[in-house]
Image (spheres, rainbow, N blue to C red):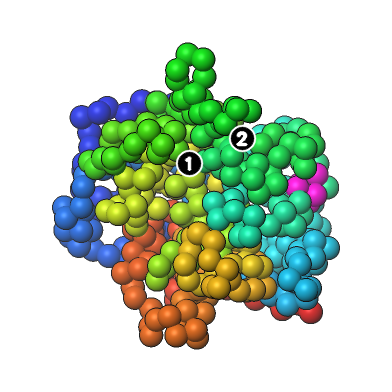
Amino acid sequence: MAKTPFSRRRFFKVLGTGSLVVAGAPLAASPESILKQQQQKPETNIADAAEVPRNINSMPGKYPGKVSRVIHPGAILDNEIIEEQVYIMLEKAMLQLTGEKKLKNAWRQFVSPGERIGLKVNPVAGKTLTTSHAVTRSIIKQLEESGIDRGDIIIWDRRLMQLHETGYTEENYPGIKVMGTEQQDEKGSYYGSDGKLYGEKMIDRDWYYWADVEGEYDEYTIPFMVNGGKYSYFNRIVTQELDKIINVPILKNAGATVTAAMKNLAFGSVSNTGRLHAQLWNETSAYVCAFAPVRDKVVLNIVDGLKGCFNGGPGANPQFFCNYNTMLVGTDPVAIDRIAHEIVVAKRIEEGIQNADNPRASAFLDMAENLELGISRRELIEVHEINLG
């Protein structure tokens, strides 16, 4: 894919243009309200994202507004996820989503032999709440059964160290590359003999998300951010190593909202993210996904909702872990996150954590809809539920 360097002088343009309307539906918010919200926030270069033409794979993909949800209490036994049952859940979801009768044909709607396919997992919370290996192995097995060579599959996330700590190693996944932006050597150092961070070679300075806000990083923190300043560079994994991305997040909360498809992609694809959490969490979750390296490559979102959390997320707080016993599959990450948000909020209300949904907590979904990344409005989303066991 050709890369287009963006001018550093073009930081802010009005978003309410005709090119940013979901086909066949009005904007979820008026251009005036979007502009007002944006003017109260640090400026960004989101307008640059629309300058790269879309392609047939661009979000929201083949099935906008459609979510396949599989529920299977029997997939967890004695707190252990049963891989054979997960495989069946994924199979049912893929067939339902695509309308195909054969699993191979379902997968081949999205991927083809010879393409380099990345599985974006989420190991941030550690071993106790990572993307489950049962889900990841089921995806790999079905990809292989569909004609995808194992050597063309890459498991990736932002921090290679966390991937290794949670069992995502090339020893456990022979023949598959495991990649991350931030890296350490065998001695635990982030720096090479030249004094440069290993992570610097993993960022692509031709692609970036600019935001007029900076973080304060000390010597301990900067290796995790790779660079400071106002630029968050996309990693070379998404810009150069992959043709297609399958997004495999976990069903977790982030305060009163959800961290699933959009957050997993956005904060995992760029550097220098610490500065973005306080002022631009919603914007970053939506905006980063609007840039071509993510927007045009993510063909499937498979939410691991077998085990998740309803409070204390996205980190690991075992007292708030729960078995959702579910899987969400679709091409539309916005619709996926709307349903994921619904599930998490319902659990939080049931547990007495909050009394009702707060629309502001899912503002990133409305922002994403206005960027044509998917459908946020619940009444326009079709959920096809499959109950097993």
Location of residue 70 by image quarter: bottom right
Foreground: 182 or 69?
Answer: 182
Can you say whether 184 is above or below 328 in the image?
above
- Vertical placement of 2 versus 43: above or below? above
- Where residue 68 appears, as percent x and y from the top left, is 63, 68
Residue on which disc 2 sits: 179
Along the line of sight, the residue nearer the viewer: 198 or 13: 198
Q: What is the magenta range?
A: 140-144
Q: Residue at x 75, y 47 (%)?
A: 140
Q: Position of residue 109 (x, y in %)?
A: 68, 49
Amino acid carrying mark 2 in the image? Met
- Along the horizontal axis of the image, is 70 left or right of 191? right
Return the residue at label 1: 269
List x then y, in percent, for residue 222: 39, 34
Q: Does residue 137 appear anywhere in the picture? A: yes
Residue at point 27%, 53% (across, down)? 279
**Where is 82 relative to 204, above or below?**
below
Q: Which quadrant would residue 177 be assigned to in this image?
A: top right
Q: On screen, 33 above or below 155?
A: below
SS state under label 2: strand
Tag in front: 1 or 2: 2
- Which residue does the image show at 56% across and 65% down from the upper left? 251
